[in-house]
Amino acid sequence: MSGSPPERSGLEIAVIGMAGRFPGARNVESLWRNLCAGVESIHFFSDQELRAAGLAEAVLARPGYVKARAVLEDAECFDAELFGFTPREAEITDPQHRLLLECAWEALEDAGYDPRRYAGDIGIYCGAGLNTYAFILFSRPDLMREVGMYQAFLATDKDFLATRISYKLGLTGPSLSVQTACSTSLVAVHLACQALLGGECQMALAGGVSVSFPQQVGYQYEEGGIHSPDGHCRAFDAQARGTVSGNGLGVVALKRLGDALADGDRVLAIIKGSAINNDGAHKIGYTAPSVDGQAKVIRMAQASAGVDPATIGYVETHGTGTELGDPIEIAALRRVFVDSAPRADRCALGAVKTNVGHLDAAAGVTGLIKAVLALDRKQIPATLHFSRPSPRLDLEDSPFYVNDRLAAWEGAGTPRRAGVSSFGIGGTNAHVVLEEAPPPAPGGPSRDWQLLLLSAGTRPRRSRAARPRPCSTAGTKRAPSRLPSSSRARDRSTSTWDWRSTTRRSPSASKWTAAAICWPQGGSTCGACSIRLRAQRRRRRASWNRPPWRSPPCSPSNMRWPGCGWPGECNPR
């Protein structure tokens, strides 16, 4: 941390765990590696792939049809056994619900907590994108007759997203499904912070998910719309003309900072303040952004945080790369930051949409996760496809620059701070102010040998957990040289599985010899190789192996599915 320790107001929120799945990245660590390497995780489909997905020839031949999308790998898979789902129940449940349930469980594991053994109340605030899986289910009248419309409704509707997670994980705090379009997940983070500060819960999960089907589909480019003509998002660049859609999800685990420090939690970053608002009617149209609304919410968040804008070194922007959105976002930032005290250096701008596309309801939490990682690793990843700034932004005469390469984040006499913005169609805006975590307290002396518990739901899974395997952090600065002699995190987070065993290790050993003893700094996974410590899970395909939008074929008597070809075109297969 830079400079002297900052004063605390008692209103800070600690980020103590994170989990997510993103295009080209199965977890948060993979996302960070991709960001640092400048990877663009947009998939460009061949005509053969799109035909196999059921797209009509007429659509493929359309001028302006862009064959690109950010795809989420294994979106149809789910560990039904772990969460007590029957095969049929798992099959009819919207994959957005299934994936977010897994991600919520992983975020708690990353934080080092078993929700069923936690003494306090855990809340959850989350939202989902458009439910397209229902089209698949409703195109199968045989299935609807078997399970019934009511069960299908419960399994797919957004209203039951948060409460299903609370039911399956045993969460007893507030359980709210949040829907504000693109800003959903960052609004959820704000609401979770308010619930923690208001004493409604002692821990909270917040996030969002957006997964639409079929994934193997492009989009029709429209001049002046939000989508890019070539499948690339060039935020703030002179060639910026839109974004590209994608699928993904993310969840963060939050706690009041004082409680987190008292409980010995690993703190990844601090939420100093947050705010939400709406643009109202003072803009050119319902879907248009507003300079006034965005500037106001950023000011509110900074006032809540009690920080001077001059101390904020990085802003993870909404950054869609649209011809209307980028200039308005920069104008709002200028209005807030120019009024601050003079800066010693300029503030970096980033946009994760250039890497993974626009993840809709999960866009805000994805930006938050990126900013938390930047604070934790003290590096700012590059914003891709940036060569020269758009002249409409006038960045040269501003406190900002677009960070176009991986850069070390140097301290400037105050703690490193970042802002995160997310703006929804319809005008609901959210902004969060982050600060780097305080340095961890020094540990005490450790015994030469440590005894760690392995547990899993079955004997084979326990055996896999104990299988010798070298850890990728061995010999690196991220591998702890000594293990704590006692750990509250270890005791409180290990789920009570039926099959258990123990293993031991000497801290002087040259390699970590088993996955289950790759001990993280306060969490449940190794920070670099993301090896899961406790429940060894098995994810199986839970969705339809044969896409139902290809059978039966479209007809006037049944619902048309967009996979057949937009809009309302029939493509019997």
Image (spheres, rainbow, N blue to C red):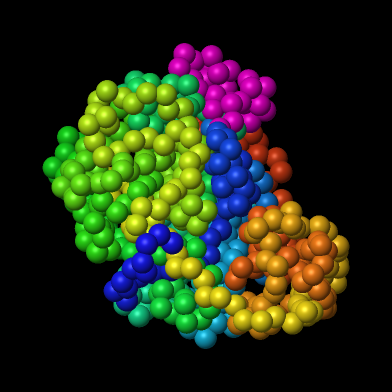
Camera-side residue of 243 and 470: 470
Residue 396: tell me if it is visible.
Answer: yes
Please report the residue visible at 58 percent of the width from the left and 55 percent of the height from the top.
99
Camera-side residue of 534 and 411: 411
Camera-side residue of 152 and 544: 544
Number of numbered callouts drawn: 0
Task: Tell me: 446 left or right of 199.
Answer: right
Residue 290: x and y, percent?
20, 41
Task: Tell me: 327 left or right of 211.
Answer: left
Q: Quadrant of residue 503?
A: bottom right
Please report the residue visible at 63 percent of the width from the left and 31 percent of the height from the top.
53
Q: Quadrant of residue 482?
A: bottom right
388 inside magenta stretch: no
Please report the residue visible at 81 percent of the width from the left and 57 percent of the height from the top.
470
Residue 456: x and y, percent?
77, 72
Please report the residue visible at 36 percent of the width from the left and 79 percent of the height from the top.
200
Residue 179: tell me if it is visible.
Answer: no
Relative to 364, is 71 above or below? above
Task: Tell me: 527 left or right of 18.
Answer: right
Relative to 393, is 336 above or below? below
Camera-side residue of 143 and 130: 130
The range drawn in magenta is 42-68
Residue 58: x and y, percent?
54, 17
